[in-house]
Amino acid sequence: MGLSSGQSPVSYERMEKTKEEEQYQVEMRAADPEVVSVPPTPQYGSTPLATSAQHSPLNFSSPGNYSPRPATAHTPIGNISPSNLVSPGEMRSPLTPLRFTLSPIGTPVRKAFINMKQYLEDIGHLTKLNPHDAWLPITESQNGNAYYSAFHNLNAGIGFQALLLPVAFTFLGWTWGVLALVIAFLWQLYTLHLLVYLHEAVPGKRYNRYIELSTAAFGERLGVWLALFPVIQLSAGTATGLIIIGGSTLRLFYETACGSRCQNGPLTVIEWYLVFAILCCLVAQLPNLNSVAYVSLVGAIMSVGYCTMVWTLSLSKDRPQGVSYAIVKPGSSTATVFSILNALGIIAFAFRGHNLALEIQSTMPSTLKHPSHVPMWRGTKVAYIIVAFCFFPLAIGGYWAYGNKMLPSGILYSLANYHHDISPALLGVTLLFVILSLLSSFQIYSLPMFDSFEQAYTSKTNKPCPKLVRFAFRVFFVFISFFAAIALPFASSFAGLIGGLTSIPVTFTYPCFMWLSIQRPAKYSFNWYITWTLGILGTFFTFAITAGGIWSIVDAGLKFNFFKPQ
C-alpha cells in the first residue's frame, strides 16, 4: 500500500502501528470474553474520518473513535499532517490509563487480578477460621462430599428406636398412626433442611457444631443453656444405650449361634457389656469424622439390612392367634391421654441425627461457587428417601403382623417370641447386622464428645492433641459409658422423660426458632407462618411428651437396681 498525496511517512507509519495494536486488542478480547471490551487510547495520526456523529467531546459511536479532540469534516485522511495531530499534553484524558492494562506490558497485571478473583472464589467466603479447628476430629478433614453425607445421615438416622415404631401404632391405630408418622417425617425433614442452610447463614462464619449455632441464634448464655444438656445426652446418653443394647444383642447372638448347648453362657451380662465396649473402643480410634465415612457406610447397610429382614420375616410368618387392631386403651381417660403422648414420643424419637447435621456438613469444603449446603443436602435427600423405605414398612408391616400382640420391647423381640421356627442362621444374621449397626452408630454419636475433650485440650495448650492423649480421651469416654451402663440399668425407664427434654427440641423445635432468629424471613410470608407454627407446636409437644414420660414413671413405678443389669 503506497502513500497518499500529502501524507508524510511518519503519519503513515503511526497509522500502521495503530492498526496493528487494534488488531491485537481484538484478538485479546476474543481469547478472554470475560474481560470488558475497552477501546484503545488514541494515538498520533489515528484521527478517523469525521461523521455527523463525531461532533462531541468524546465520540463513542464506533470502535476507534475515542479521541478527545473531534475530527473535522475538512480533514481528509490524505491531508493529515503533524499540525492536525493531538499533542501529548492534550491526550491526558481519563481513558489514557487504560492503555497500560490493555497493552502487552499490562496483560500480566490484568491476568493477576483475574487469578486473584478466582483464588478468592476458591477459598470460599473469606471465612474467619478458628485455627484450632484444624486440630479437632470434626473439622480437621474437609474433603467430604455428597456420598459421605448420605453415609453419615443413614448411619445416624436409622437406629434401634425404629424397632419400636409398631408399638406406637397399638395406641394410635391405623389412621392416626400412619398420619402421625407421615407428619413427623416431613416435619423433621423440614427442620433438617433449615439446619443445612443455617450452617453458613452468616457471611464469613461456619457453624460447625450445634451449640455454636444455638449460641448465635439465642445468645451466649441462653444458647448454651438450651443446647448443652440435649447435645451431651444425645451423644453420651446414646453411647450408654448402645452399650446396653449391644451387649444384650451379643449375648443373644452367641446363644443363637450355639443353640441349646450354650443356654448357660460362660459370660455374665456385665461381661457381655464389656466385650461390646472393647469393640467400641477399637473402632473409636479412627481420627476424624471423614475417616469413619466407610464405617458409616457399613453401618448404613447393616441398618437397612436388619430393618428389611425384620419386617419381611414378620410378614412371611403366620400372625399370632387372636391378633386385633383395636386401639389399646388403658383404664382411665388420663391414662389414655398419656399413652397417646407416649406413642407420639416413640414416633418422634425414631427420627434422630439432627444433633450431628452441622458436624457432618463441616467436613465438606465450601467456596463461593460450590457452597457446602449443595452436597450436604443432596446426600441428605438420598439418605432420607432410604429412611422412609425402612421406617414405613417396619411400622405398618410390624403392626399388621402382630397388632395388639406387639411386645413393648419392639418388633425384633416379638419376632423371636412368636416365631420359634425361624432358622437360627437367618436369625443370627439379623442379630449380626444389628451388632455391626450399633458399633458404627457408637462411633458417629461419640465424636462430638471426643471433639469436646480435644477442644478443651487445644484451647488450654494451644497445640494439637498428641496421639497418646487422643487415645486416652477415647478410652476414658468408652469406660465412662460402660460404667453408666452397668451402674444405671434402669435408665431406660427415663426414656420418655429424657427424650422429651432432648430429642424433641433438638429435632423439631430449636431449628425453627434458630431460622427465625438468624434468617428473619419476611413477616406473614409462607415461610414465616410455617416456621412459627412448627416451632410453637414443637414447644407444646416438648412439654406434653415430657409430662407423659413423668406419668409413665409414676404409673409403672421405678426400682433403683444399681449395678444389677438384667
Image: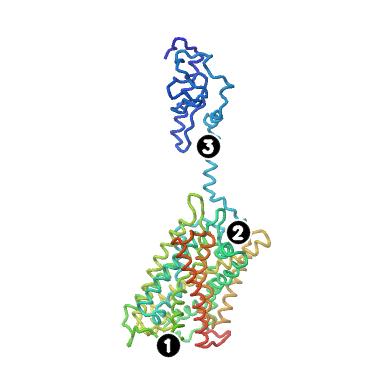
Determine the CA span between mark 1 and mark 3: 77 Å
Question: For numbered disc 3, what is the local secondary structure?
Answer: helix
Q: Earlier in the sequence, mark 1 or mark 3?
A: 3
Q: What residue did someone put label 1 on? A: 330
Mark toward the viewer: 1 or 3: 1
Is residue 430 in view from this perspective?
Answer: yes
Mark toward the viewer: 2 or 1: 1
Q: Residues within 10 Å of mark 1 (few under 14, many from 20)?
A: few
* Location of residue 517 in the rendering, given as x and y in whole percent from the top left corner: 54, 62
Q: Earlier in the sequence, mark 2 or mark 3?
A: 3
- Residue 171: which quarter of the image? bottom left
- In the displayed structure, does residue 261 sit left or right of residue 453? left
The residue sitting at the right extreme is 461
The residue sitting at the bottom extreme is 331
Q: Are marks 1 and 3 in contact (CB under 8 Å)?
A: no
Amino acid type of the residue tagged 1 in the rendering: Pro
Q: What residue did someone put label 2 on? A: 135
* Location of residue 288 in the rendering, given as x and y in whole percent from the top left corner: 55, 62
Determine the CA span between mark 2 and mark 3: 36 Å
Q: Residue at x 51, y 71 (%)?
A: 505
Amino acid type of the residue tagged 3 in the rendering: Lys
